[in-house]
Image (spheres, grey):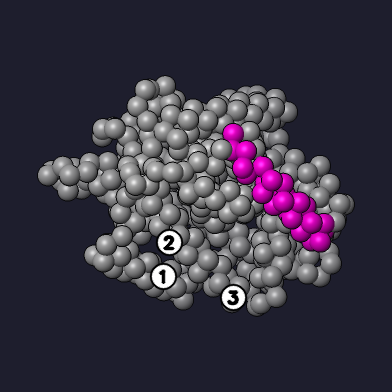
Amino acid sequence: MDSKNRFAFVACVVALFLLVFALRATHKLPPSSFKAFYCAGQAVLDGRDPYVVEPLRTCERIVAPGALPAYAVEPAPLPGYAIGPFVVAALAPPDLARDVYFVVLIAALAVTATMLARLAPLPAVAVLLALLATWFLNLSYGEPPPITTACIVLAALMLQRNRPWVAAVAAGGLALEPHLAAPLWLALALFAPRTRLPLLVVGCALIALDAAIGGPHAAVEYFVRTLPAQALSEVSAADQFSLTHVAVVAGASVPLALRLGFISYAVMAVLGILVARRLSLKGAAPEYLALVPPAFILVGGTYLHDIQFYSALPLALVLLARAPRPSFGLAAATVLLAVPWVEASSRLMLVLSATSVFAIGWIALPKRPWRIAACAGAAIIAVALVIAIGRLPAVKRGTIAAIPSAATALRDDDQAPLAWSIYLGNNPILTSASPRSLIRMVPTWGGALLLVFCSLALAGRARTLAPPEPLAAGRSAS
């Protein structure tokens, strides 16, 4: 990175830091999901169960008073080892812990952009701006995908640089979201032999941490009770992008919809691993073993929000930068994934979305004299589409009748996702049985499907997709 680009990158990170904490100071960034993670850590710190209604409910009322009705609980459906960092956070007061969490999310964006710039290769400031809109959506909800996405990119870069131990540690960080980690771990274990021992060591460390956090009982509870309850709790949630949700809206029974979602996850995981192998062999580019599988499993599934599509952007940007010629398909896929179409109606999100689209256009059209005009036009069109999508109906009269609607039967030892499902069922604005409401999700779905299609097409071509020399030299983790 030359001095001019370095200055621009640092200036963007500083400006982003000032923006986030200005919004924080004016109470425009509520605790959102951070309250659930913090309270799960507090529960473990107090020697209590982090997956049940109490003590989460009482803690969340303290951390975010008035955010939810008195009976409601936002669950923290994380495995025990993933709650570990929030146990440390719970040692601090909630406000201080949240400020530190915001700093971590900002740092995760900066690190992701820096590493992707080396992988692609691309100007780091362009990568940062391309990631900006969906990253900010994650920050506003207090969600961890910026951290796990940084782990994906770190694993990819370390595979490229033949550092299997660091790649395995990064894969361990990705286990914060097990559904993303599973296909990546399998791809490395199958096709990057030098990572097998490191993955075994990291896996044992995670098991030991999990045992220290909650022991075997908590692990069994998480996989046997909490995860299934969480999947069931949001089958009708209006912000679900999963195949399970689509199937329920289309009239399928909940058990069948959950089964279809699981099957689609398994199919896309296998396909992603095979495409990753093909791309890695074509260009002697083992980094695809980390980049491809997490992106592919975002098509379908049982439980999926728009915030999670952030994890597909590293693959989209790397393919876009490495394509042998400008690719309209890859550019369109990247734009569709980078803009939070359903939730970008505020003026700030419109500005951030336009910035991301402009940056993606800048990446897609290198050394074109007319690219400023093209990028500006694309940004304007994207903003117009966001506004139009925001005016589409979000909710149909009535809700799916698979969710309990009474809160009176809740017990303190009930699973937290049960309380969450009751809360959703009592709020029609948060649920929808309308096929028309699914139109709002089409751009994001289209981006994920188009990225899969482009990846398949590139995997079948004769030309490689390795980065230019010297980055492509002397690297292999297999």
Q: Quadrant of the C terminus?
A: top right
Residue 86 visible in the snapshot:
yes
Q: Secondary structure at mark 3?
A: helix
C-alpha gap between disc 3 and disc 2: 23 Å
Residue at point 65%, 78% (across, down): 93
Q: Residues within 10 Å of mark 3 (few under 14, many from 20)?
A: few
Amino acid carrying label 1: it is: Phe
Q: Which mark is residue 17?
A: 1
- Residues shaded magenta: 191-214
Choose the circle earlier in sequence order: 3 or 2.
3
Residue 72 seen = no
Marked residue nearer the N-terminal end (3 or 1): 1
385 or 89: nearer the eye?
Answer: 89
Which residue is the site of mark 3? 95
Give the amino acid at mark 2: Ala
Give the quarter of the image for residue 142: bottom right
The residue lying at 22 percent from left, 41 percent from top is 365
In the rendered view, tell whether residue 222 sits above or below residue 54.
above
- Residue 179 x, y percent position in the rendering: 64, 41
Give the vertical position of 34 relative to 374 (above or below).
below
Which mark, residue 133?
none
Q: Which residue is mark 2?
A: 110
Name the front one of labels 2 and 1. 2
Badge 1: residue crowd in 10 Å (few <14, some 14–19, many ≥20): some
Q: CA distance from mark 3 to mark 1?
A: 17 Å
Left or right placement of residue 4 versus residue 338 in this view: left
Is 203 magenta? The answer is yes
Q: Residues within 10 Å of mark 2 (few under 14, many from 20)?
A: many
Q: Earlier in the sequence, mark 2 or mark 1?
A: 1
Q: Dividing the picture into quarters, in which one does residue 319 lie?
A: top left
For the point 50% across and 69% down, the residue is 103
